[in-house]
Amino acid sequence: MKFRELLETWEKSAAERRTHKAYLVRLPMHDAAKLATLAEMFPGRSEQDIITDLLSTALDEIEAAFPYVQGSRIVSEDEQGDPIYEDAGLTPRFQSLTRKHLQTLSAEPDEV
């Protein structure tokens, strides 16, 4: 999700399953002021919702920013028949570790 899409989502309402674990952060003053501004501009969103959405969007963007590093193994061919090599960069490891942690988090019992 891009930040533009996030703003469009805020104008609607969306809920996703949340972890039981809370993450405590202390914001720089200028960021806290911006957070309060967004909460005022989008009164249907709590500051916690905004932080969650911003973090989710930032994580999507950092994953997309990992550079592709051509590996040595051919994994497919494109439309012209040229080889497509595996990504030997950070993306596959990030995705693999994300799946591992998602499986762990998903196995936790739902809070009542």
Image (tube, rainbow, N blue to C red):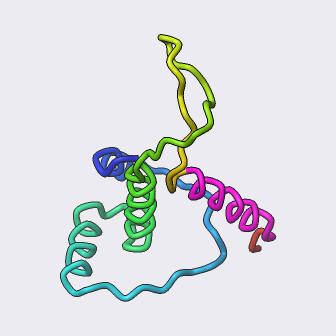
Q: Is residue 100 above or below residue 89?
A: below
State how many labels appear.
0
- How far from the left and from the top, in percent, is residue 97? 64, 61
Question: What secondary structure is the magenta-colored segment mainly?
Answer: helix
Instruction: Looking at the picture, tell me which residue is in the foreground, 12 or 89.
Output: 89
Identify which residue is drawn at 24% across, 68% down: 40
Is 60 situated left or right of 85 in this image? left
Q: Which residues are magenta?
A: 92-109
- How far from the left and from the top, in percent, is residue 109? 81, 70
Magenta segment: does it hold 95? yes
Identify which residue is drawn at 66% across, 75% down: 20
- Residue at the top extreme, as displayed: 80
Magenta segment: does it hold 73? no
Q: On the image, which quarter does residue 15 sit in?
A: bottom right
Q: Is residue 11 above or below residue 56?
A: above
Identify which residue is drawn at 49% across, 51% down: 14
- How far from the left and from the top, in percent, is residue 103? 75, 60
Instruction: Looking at the picture, tell me which residue is in the foreground, 72 or 58.
Output: 72
Identify which residue is drawn at 74% across, 62% down: 106
- How far from the left and from the top, in percent, is residue 27? 32, 85
Q: Is residue 68 above or below residue 38?
A: above
Could you tell me which quadrant the C terminus lies in?
Answer: bottom right
Is 12 situated left or right of 109 in this image? left
Instruction: Looking at the picture, tell me which residue is in the foreground, 62 or 75.
Output: 75
Q: On the image, which quarter does residue 26 sit in?
A: bottom left
Instruction: Looking at the picture, tell me which residue is in the foreground, 23 or 12.
Output: 23
